[in-house]
Image (tube, helix red, strand yellow):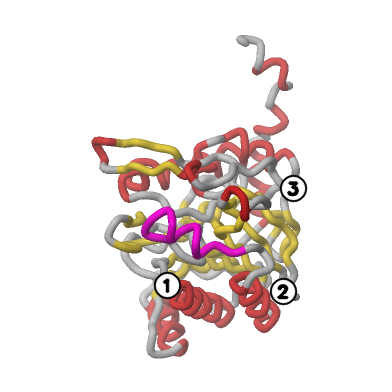
Amino acid sequence: MRLFTALRERKPSLAAGLLALRSKAVLGQTRMSSSSSLPVAAVCQMTATPDKEANFSSCRRLVEQAKEGGACMVFLPEGFDYIGSNREETLELSESLDGDVISRYSHLARKLDMWLSLGGFHERGHDWKTDRRIYNSHIIINGQGEMVSVYRKTHLFDVELTSKGVSLKESAFTIPGPRLVPPVQTPIGKVGLGVCYDLRFPELSSALQRHGAEILTYPSAFTVATGTAHWEVLLRVRAIETQCFVLAAAQVGAHHAKRTSYGHALAVDPWGEVIGDCGGSDVGLTLVQIDLQRLQDVRRDMPVQQHRRDKDFYRSLD
């Protein structure tokens, strides 16, 4: 059995959010595990705007709600710091890793003794003064407020879906990351890092799994068109093929006049079952227990990795 609940943001007070949690439990929408010792992850959903202060306040409330709900690690989506309304605004609002935004999240993590996955931070590039380009960076901060890993998104979203009204060219101002980073040991298990569009590239998830990942995470801001068609399917197949938990925080709703995100922040278990879904309209979070014994059972009963052939075999058609 697994814990699943969606905590919708209640602005009046944290207590109101906790009341919502208790109410859902009474209604039978929460499935409690028989083991209270399993670590709990909080997968969050928000609506970022160009207002960085408002975004931080929204995220802080979610992290505080996650703490009260028993989570030891919180996952925030791509663009948690802001989503700009145009290229110039996006660049102007960006910061370095030692800027105010990450400093505030480090303080929050230390204050609450919470691990944070900050997916999709607008990080100024190493040659910012000459080229004004940024990285899309996924940052892990531990419970002492220390930055323990930074992954820079490698696959950039350059897509023209004319019939769907989707036109984005991330590479116009974003530098592709140079490499993957090793999975990070956290209180919920070993977490492999991706960002949004990386989800479409199974080579990335397979590489992370080979290097010990037990949880894959894809903080995202999927468009409504691509999310409706592909979001849940892709997350479930990444879980099935790697036999990992998959946690995907998400943006939801209208960020400004030009952009709207799909939502449905999801948690998926190693069998491919959805164990948490924040829905497609509200800010909130889902709390899920991470049962690594479940992962080991799935891998034992269907030993896909042991059946995998060597790399040369899969290249025999080249």
Residue found at the far left of this picture: 163
Which residue is found at the position 59% from the left and 42% from the top? Answer: 176
Q: Which of 33 and 12 is in front in this view?
A: 12
What residue does disc 2 label?
145
What residue does disc 1 label?
51
Amino acid carrying mark 2 in the image = Gly
Q: Nearer the viewer, mark 2 or mark 3?
A: 2
Q: Quarter of the image holding residue 154? A: top right
Relative to 312, 261 lies left or right? left
The magenta region covers 84-95
What residue does disc 3 label?
182
Sequence-wise, the earlier of marks 1 and 3 is 1
SS for tag 2?
A: loop
Q: Where is residue 70 in the image (x, y as percent from the top left)?
A: 59, 77
**Quadrant, the C terminus:** top right
Which residue is found at the position 45% from the left and 90% from the top? Answer: 15
